[in-house]
Image (cartoon, helix red, strand yellow):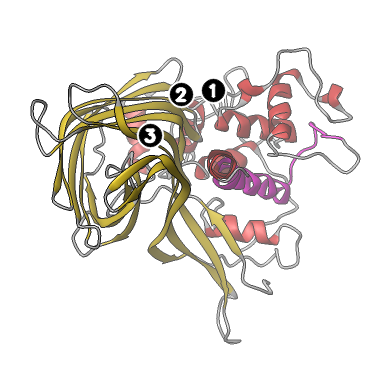
Amino acid sequence: MYKKTLILIIFLLLISSVSFADIVTYEAGVVGDPTMDAGVNEYSEYFFLTGKPILLSGTCEVSDIPDKDNYSRTFSFELSNTDENVILTREITYDITNKKDSELSQTIYKADINKIDESITANGVSYNLGSFLFDRSKLIDNTPAVDYYSGNVYFERKYYINGDAITNDGVIVHKINSLTDIGYSHYWGDSETLILEHEITMKESSFDDSPKWSANITTKNSSIDKKRFQYIETDPQNISFRGSYVKNNTMENIVQCTYNLPTISGGTIDELNRIESEKNITKDVITDYESLISPKIKDIGGHWAEDNIFLLCSLGIFDNSNEYFAPNSQMNRIMFGKAIANSLADIEKSDLTDQIIRDRDKTDKLFFDIENSDIDYNYIKFLKERKIINGEYGYFKPYRPISRAEAIKIMVNALGLEYLAPMPPYTTTFTDDKMIPKWARDSVYVANEIGLVHGYPDGTFRPDVYLNKADATALIANFINHIKDTITIDYREKIINKY
């Protein structure tokens, strides 16, 4: 069935000793491998307060995110560089608030520092934190498939060298301002990209406004959690399945750091002769391996959709209870809706107890043609509550064949991208543009623009063509690939690597 190893990349929100991909620091640092201590990971960052880049290594510990809107998180770091004789400990507690707007399905995230303790010594010189300012906020758009966000950060700290505000050997001010603060979170993964502009100035004393030296640093931090699937073909001839997928969970952390610093020679800082250079740290951490089921399907060998069908059945997107998939049979609305729901969340099937409770409580019907005892009730509820499928005049019409226009409308609804369509009137690039129904026009336009769907070789879209099951698997596989791959290119490669 498969002639070679097939590797697919799928992004997933991981649950590990340190739960990311929210970036743990506003310094030039990355998280590494888990240590033997629960909740503690290796960690490295570049340190600039002495006027030159010094790589510090050690550990970080991050508290879990509780399942509530308002909470606190503590980030603890223990770092050092023996050759440069630098020791740094840092503990920061953030107070997090999330204010939700249910009407717009948006959340305002706000982070403030409740407490910060830093102890820094470098070659016998102490850098004592005197004051700080901090603000971070994000607008999170909660769509059914993806929570997209964009925000901003400002962080300012003042350090007194070998003293306090009154008596010291100098004052260092470190200002951090965000140039880019974007990310996303979804069923298949999450990511954060944070580009920060750092300005460091050192003055002779608290009462001297003229800087002795200054530094400019730009850090590009990116953290992505991903799940990889590798198809392994079985070697023995006498075995009951041909092959299966193995998944491994990987956490990718990257920091690119460009800087403009004064020259330091023999402990003397030369502001006139400066150094412009770059430092990078990358760390990929594999956190888990797991075998997936191997579907036993008799009628897909050699079919053009074989790979898509096998993958989606391995992932549980489609039901594996039948040994025949019937790829050329028609796809109906409930089958397609369930597959989309399974692509977005873990949904429990409705059991007899659920049905009894709904009947006893006289739960309102979701649609006129869906009974509260329906075995697919939880899927249909998920689709309706998230406005992925709205029905027609109060009817779901579960067993009606689904058209290409309907399928695209459902997928774009899930992605929350229908608002990207231009103001009408406008035309799509398809030669049968006039055949696209008004209710699907925005979705078809957006799906074509983002590469979620392509037309036929003759340039048509064919909105009224009913999907068979093979066609549907191709659309859903592309839908998942868009979420896990295309969005990542937008949120990291295009920004960090100038893709």
Q: Quadrant of the C terminus?
A: top right
Front residue (pair 28, 365): 28
Percent position of residue 399, x then y: 64, 37
* Residue holding disc 3: 198
Choose between 127 and 192: the one closer to the eye. Answer: 127
Toward which corner of the image does residue 421 lie, by quadrant? top right
Helix, strand or loop at mark 3: strand
Please report the residue visible at 71 percent of the width from the left and 51 percent of the height from the top: 470
Q: Is residue 494 left or right of residue 105?
A: right
Q: Please give the range of residues in magenta.
A: 460-487
Disc marking residue 365: 2
Is residue 356 shown to the viewer in this render?
A: yes
Q: Is residue 41 above or below residue 353?
A: below
Instruction: State the residue position of label 1.
Output: 368
In percent of width and height, residue 258 lies at: 46, 44
Are there few (<14), some (14-19), or many (20+) residues within 10 Å of tag 2? Answer: some
